Amino acid sequence: MLLLLAEPGVPLARAVNFRRSVAGAESNVAAGLARLGHRVRWLGRVGDDPAGEAVLRELRADGVDTSWAGVDPDLPTGLLMRDSHPGRAVDVQYFRTGSAASHLAPEHIRPEALDGARLCHVSGITPMLSSTAAAATRRLVDTARSAGALVSFDPNVRHKLGGAAQWAQTVGPLLREADIVLAGERELEMLTARTADEAAAELLKGRARTVVIKGEDHTATAVTADGRWTQQPFPVPAVDPVGAGDAFAAGYLSGLLRGLPQQESLAEGACVAALVVQSVTDTDGLPTAAARDRALAALTGGGESVHR
């Protein structure tokens, strides 16, 4: 989606000046992984309008391959408006109904788009947009399986898209289709009607290799058949909390793709999230690999706090 971010500290209803950017759970992860040095492809749909042009241009500027993205000649690009307050709840308004993304359909998912992919990352937001988008998500997961790619899944629950029962019915089954699950403890409880630990144990009996439980205290615990590892959040001043979950996913998945152990991957995820919440917009703080390494060294006390 195109993001219109209100001037810092001003409530959305009173804001006059807005900054344009790009937002969206999957595109945030795509941009994060691309900046960290991975080859990334984004699948989705935008409108044939200035907003869609801006979205694709910014993704390409981050090094994301958009050659398989669809441009709808009739429907508009989705829009997100929000404000930014470090000290109180953020007001987010979505304009997705009738958008090009909401009309994503199975025929838009072509097997060639997954050629060479090692990992396919999906969020629960897309299947909640419409019945056709849900069918497209299921086809994407099946196509990823056929291509030999791992599937990572983040429910990314947005209550404005539907109630708990609808989320459990539409998104709950996708938890069981993922090799890597990244979910908040309350999300797991809502989607499975079990505690987070019970849900993780059940998922690991099925297809899942790893379940990462994101706690209400901002800890992250990776659970596998071999054990569990917990990462504490890094204490940093938060300017804008939106996008932290996607940033964590990008950092963590980058570690796994590079063959790092769970604890190191969790630390990288926490580091990337800590960098993102110190900047406005969902993507301003996403680091390069070198910037991540410098920040991680500083946050763990092993490096200089000023890069000269």
Image (cartoon, rainbow, N blue to C red):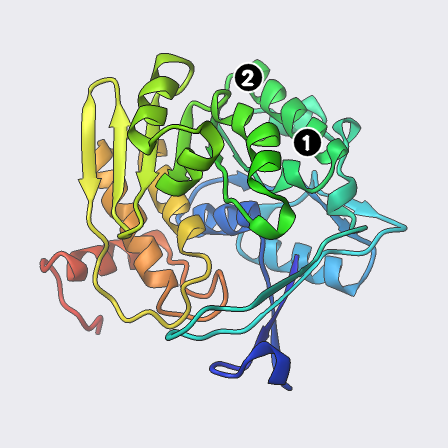
Query: Depth check: 59 or 205 in front?
Result: 205
Residue 13 in which image quadrant: bottom right
- Answer left or right for 21 relative to 291: right
- Answer left or right for 308 relative to 181: left
**Pointer 2 local density, CA inside 10 Å: few below 14, some 14–19, many at least 20:** some
For this orientation, the residue located farthest to the right is: 74
Please, what secondary structure does the residue beneath circle 1 have? Answer: helix
Residue 261 in the image: x percent, y percent? 22, 31
Q: Does 45 appear above or below 170?
A: below
Instruction: Tell me the mark number nearer the camera, choosing from 2 and 1.
Output: 1
Q: Does 112 appear above or below 9?
A: above
x 65%, y 36%: residue: 127
Residue 124 in the image: x percent, y percent? 56, 38
Q: Label 1 is placed on what type of residue?
A: Ala
Which label belongs to residue 134? 1
- Asked whether residue 254 is in view, the answer is no
Q: CA distance from mark 2 to mark 1?
A: 17 Å
Please, what secondary structure does the residue beneath circle 2 have? Answer: helix
**Pointer 1 local density, CA inside 10 Å: few below 14, some 14–19, many at least 20:** many
Residue 212 in the image: x percent, y percent? 33, 35
x 41%, y 31%: residue: 181
x 73%, y 38%: residue: 130
x 51%, y 16%: residue: 148
Q: Label 2 is placed on what type of residue?
A: Arg
- Answer left or right for 198 relative to 164: left
Q: Which residue is mark 2?
A: 145
Query: Depth check: 78 or 72 in front?
Result: 78
For this orientation, the residue located farthest to the left is: 302
